[in-house]
Amino acid sequence: MFRHIALAIAAATIGGCQGLDFQTVLRDDHPYTISPLPGKCPSKYFPAHAGTSVVPSPPLQIHPLIVSGPSSNRVDLVFFSDGYTDEEQDKFIEDAARLAEDISGNQTFSTVRPLMNFWAAFSASKESGIGVGGVPKDTTYGLYRDGTELRGVYYDKPEVAGAACSSMGEQCDYPILLGNDPYYGGLGGQYTVITSSLANGPLVLRHELGHSIIDVGEEYDGGFAYFGPNAATDLSEPIPWTQWLSNPPKDGSTDTPRVERAVMPLQEYAWTLLNTSTSWSTTFISSGAYARHLVRFSLSGLPESKDLRVELDGLDLEWAPKVDIGLDRWHYDIHLNQTLAGGQHEVKFTLINAEREGVAQLCSVEIIEFGDETEFVSTPGHYGLYPTFSEKNETSYRPTNEDCLMRIVTSPNFCKACIEGLWLSLLKNVSLIDDIQESCEEHSGGWVKTLDLKLVPLAQFRADTMENKNEESYTITWWKDQKILPEFTNQTRLEIAGDDAVGTYAIGVKFATQEVRIDKEKLLSAGARYKVTRNCNAQGKEVHP
Ligand SMILES: *[C@@H]1O[C@H](CO)[C@@H](O)[C@H](O)[C@H]1NC(C)=O
Ligand SMILES: *[C@@H]1O[C@H](CO)[C@@H](O)[C@H](O)[C@H]1NC(C)=O
Ligand SMILES: *[C@@H]1O[C@H](CO)[C@@H](O)[C@H](O)[C@H]1NC(C)=O
Ligand SMILES: *[C@@H]1O[C@H](CO)[C@@H](O)[C@H](O)[C@H]1NC(C)=O
Ligand SMILES: *[C@@H]1O[C@H](CO)[C@@H](O)[C@H](O)[C@H]1NC(C)=O
Ligand SMILES: *[C@@H]1O[C@H](CO)[C@@H](O)[C@H](O)[C@H]1NC(C)=O
């Protein structure tokens, strides 16, 4: 569920972070400057259950879904099964694989996929499906809905989930509890909870991972938490996405860009079951001063257009369900390119088909009014200051109209400000250097010492067929005993005559992508030092000098 996310996640700091085998020096142009050993810290979440009783992990069968590198240097997402019986193990793997591919194949997390791993951890539940009416079934993590309506899905056994994730060590950074249920529902926070809903599983997963990985708040109206690289709350402060503005301020100008002209006269999270005896309706007041408006609502349990009539001031808006949505929840936008007259208006939802009583639900309804295109640029790809209205109708600002899945949950992508934040967040936990391997090789002229630099597979090392991989680059610099080795610039392999190899090498790596314009903490740089202590002799054996 999007509205009631526990956003504050206490980061557990446990012991020292694990370092790599060689000495790496991150966040610095010059690899001779020493800073603390980097490397991935233990999971952000686990073992974080100080004070709760210790339970054993359920038995887990771990299947790799998408693996880009060693867990010690990747951000690892793990799907844990709930409500899948022994016979349903294949279904669980399929559901998890579909979700992982959906969010990282060609959209959402696709460009950062080489920094992530996805795993499926199966553990059989005694019963199939998830609980309703606040009562969990006999399942591994005890997922359940509060009532029968499609909304939040909660867990009864956080300590079991904690034990399961902890048992995987650095292979589990973001635990995702996947409930075997075909309909909308979920929860954000310490454990991301989603269902196997075809329409909504990926949608909830992307949005919740946006909160937990990028550490951003909402962009939709009616929320309570707006923060991170996609939110501005005070226009006298610098705007976090200045680097992405379509009309950047002129050099030296301190004018803030204009705010796109919009207002939200109605916002209600109704979460109400509809019946045929009485329509659900509400009223709102328009100022009459905006050229266009939008009726935005979400429904569940309404598979056919003849089930429901949606009206604005008595005018049938001719709602039609998303194709094949069945009883699942979906979001609808009806844009009306005309001015709402000043004064009171009514929006009304009438259930027509009595057979849908008990499942037909109005989840949310909102009216937004906009200026014309000269006052409010609605074009996708335009970056500016768009007002967002909180549950208390307080205004904050977002970068685009509707480009981001943190606003429009049916959109599969983040906006550029969030994507930049995503790279920076992931690179806090991933070094661009995976490994350095040393060996001796016989060449025609004799033995040579080789150092092979293994980088995270970005830019030319990408295995995927990302269209714009040419827009990424690695710049690689090698030093030996503090002297630059220009002939090896941009090479991942260093070769030095076998009897002249001993010394201290340094490697500086800089990654560039068009998706990151500002990198204050130099997260797109990495450095390493490597000591070669033996030369290669004529027989190819390692010898001390
Ligand atoms: C990522 O790095 C941050 C900062 O170094 C640390 O607080 C956090 O626990 C790390 N998270 C993971 C998942 O390793
Ligand atoms: C990604 O692939 C899916 C399934 O193949 C397809 O439906 C979707 O349109 C693709 N998205 C993009 C942005 O290409
Ligand atoms: C929010 O505030 C604006 C400006 O004061 C007002 O026009 C609008 O009707 C308010 N919306 C709600 C839902 O209260
Ligand atoms: C029918 O729906 C209306 C509007 O939501 C509500 O006020 C009323 O209590 C409902 N009636 C029953 C019998 O549930
Ligand atoms: C909306 O109405 C205006 C003014 O009548 C017109 O110029 C514009 O093309 C319309 N836009 C759309 C999307 O129909
Ligand atoms: C190394 O690669 C970077 C990034 O592609 C490029 O800008 C630079 O010119 C290259 N340097 C050399 C010496 O080829």
Image (tube, helix red, strand yellow):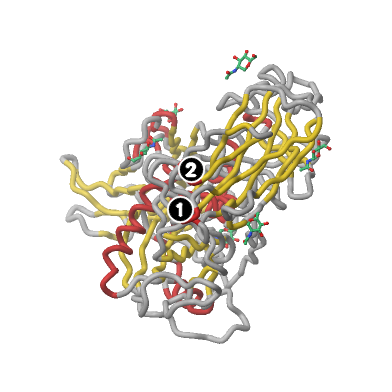
The residue closer to the viewer here, 387 or 533, is: 387
Of all residues, the one furthest to the right in this rendering is 236
Q: Quadrant of the N terminus?
A: bottom right
Give x and y (percent) for residue 78: 42, 63
**Which label belongs to residue 309?**
none
Residue under the image location 36 percent in, 80 percent down: 126
The residue closer to the viewer here, 282 or 390, is: 282
Q: On the rendered structure, is 240 left or right of 487? A: right
| Between marks 1 and 2 in the image, the one whose residue lies nearer the viewer | 1
Disc 1 packing (10 Å; few <14; some 14–19; many ≥20): many
Residue with the mark numbered 2? 508
Q: Secondary structure at mark 2?
A: strand
Q: Quadrant of the C terminus?
A: bottom left
Give x and y (percent) for residue 21: 42, 62
| Residue 64 quadrant | bottom left
Q: On the rendered structure, is 284 left or right of 15? A: right
Residue with the mark numbered 1? 328
Label 1, label 2: how far apart the Cα atoms are: 51 Å
Disc 2 within 8 angstroms of ligand 6 (CB):
no
Q: Quadrant of ligand 1?
A: bottom right
Q: Is residue 233 above or below residue 209?
A: above
Q: Amino acid at mark 2?
A: Gly
Residue under the image location 42 percent in, 80 percent down: 138
Residue under the image location 64 percent in, 30 percent down: 243
Q: Secondary structure at mark 1?
A: loop
Q: Amino acid at mark 1?
A: Asp
Give x and y (percent) for residue 210: 55, 50
